[in-house]
Image (cartoon, rainbow, N blue to C red):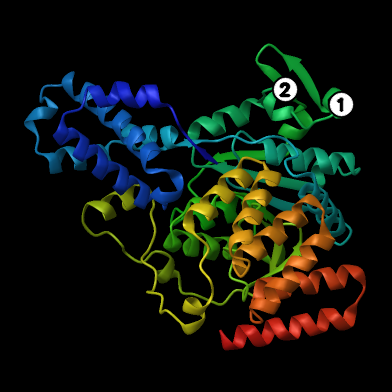
Amino acid sequence: MTTSHNTSLAQDASKKLSENDSKIASLFATVMSDAIGLDLNRVGVNSAMRAAHQALTFFKELASSKESPSEARTSEALLDQMIDNDQCRKLFIESIVVSESWLFREPKVFQHINSTICQRLKKQSKVSILSAPCAAGEEACSIALSLFESGHSQTQFRIVATDISQLAIRHALKGIFTEKALRTVDESRRQRWFAAKPQGWEVTAKAQNTIDFVHLNLLATDSPQKLLRLAGGQFDLICCRNLLIYLTKPARKELIFKLEILLKPDGELVVGAVEPAILPARDWEPTGPLTFCRHKRLDTRTETSLSRDTKQGVLSHAQNKMCGLKDPAPKVATVKDIAVPIVPREIIQEVEACANAGDIEAAIQLCQRSLRNDGAQTDLLYTLAILHQTMGDLMISEKLLVKAVYLEPRHQGALLCLALIAKQRGDTAAERRYRRSASLAGTKS
């Protein structure tokens, strides 16, 4: 997921807006961002304002063709009508979210995904996979092709791929990818699975036939029920990469809960390169590069908690339209929260942006630069360790994790990653020691 930076469109739209209309656009941007859980500081305030300007310009042009000109309405009424208008909401989403990815992104991760699914297929006849957000289908197609290359048939797996962008889903359904999307695909793989077309490269129908592309907002109240019906049950594997980093804390909490509902108790979750720090370490255990499983079965929560009414004022009206979020419980600050060195927000945002764009090396350099100024930023050490794991540098990753635990002995994420490394090395004593420490850290946090 990336954000739009079309400044020319924004300038054209701004010229047509009065000062009062600019205020309406600002309110609409805030309402819509909150309704779909986007953190404006991470998505970009300017991007959100450009999207809102375009939506308002469109709405005013639409209104001018009708009997009642928009100028005759109060600001509140105009805002309400924009929120009510399905086309305005869709235009905002399509303007702020520009789905962009490529096939076989981060090969180490795909190697682990393929290995995991192959192991599961030795014990069961079929696996179910969710790719969300799916962009134009690059990730879903990559998984399908990996499984075909491992000798598996179409009947052994099913992939459900969703995105909040209707435009992305329309592109995905065509199964045609740009040259840029195939930039890491070697010639033999390209010749085997893709056919050259005037619009780009068309993936084999064999892969397309294993994927159900669906327009869906993951944060919608009824999204788990819809996806469970589509898949006929919970998923063995969920790929949810580079979405958590763009969400507000309440939206992250809600999304993680929904992912828990969708994932089998022994299933695996794949996240983006800097998102392991977002997953609660007390609930999620690393199983490979950027892959996690739950420590225990999901705690039961009543159905009413899933659909608790949050419709309050204008914001809730938008949330109702967009199947929005419920209010989270207030977080109580702890001594641990205050004691841990805080990583500057701008550093985190730069690291996230680089990692999301696939430039892991640049993200690593940013972490290293910040750590040279303050080497006690344990969360940044942890993030840097995960980035090195993604690159396959396990020795460097382990040293960074050890340093993080030295500085913060109760850092669950680092302890669990060290346990995984020890397990892969066959050091069962060290694995037990790290897991015991992680368990104790969880009970004291």
Q: Amino acid at mark 2?
A: Glu
Q: In percent of the image, x 42 and y 43: which residue is there?
A: 44
Q: Is residue 45 toward the left or the right of residue 58 in the image?
A: right
Q: Earlier in the sequence, mark 1 or mark 2?
A: 1
Task: Look at mark 2 in the image and give the residue it sits on.
Answer: 202
Residue 6 x %, y % = 43, 27
Asked whether 379 or 81 is in front, the reply is 379
Q: Give above or below for 5 relative to 226.
A: above
Name the residue at the left extreme. 72
Label 2 secondary element = strand
**In terms of image quadrants, where is residue 70?**
top left
**In terms of image quadrants, where is residue 400?**
bottom right
Q: In percent of the image, x 64 and y 81: which residue is there?
A: 410
Asked whether 333 or 290 is in front, the reply is 333
Name the residue at the front extreme. 373
Task: Look at mark 1 in the image and give the residue it sits on.
Answer: 192
**Which quarter of the figure is the C terminus placed in?**
bottom right
Q: Give above or below for 124 relative to 179.
A: below
Q: In percent of the image, x 74 and y 28: which residue is there?
A: 182
Q: Amino acid at mark 1?
A: Arg
Residue 199 x %, y % = 65, 15
**Which quarter of the figure is the N terminus placed in?**
top right
Label 1 secondary element = helix
Between the C-alphas of marks 1 and 2, the distance is: 11 Å
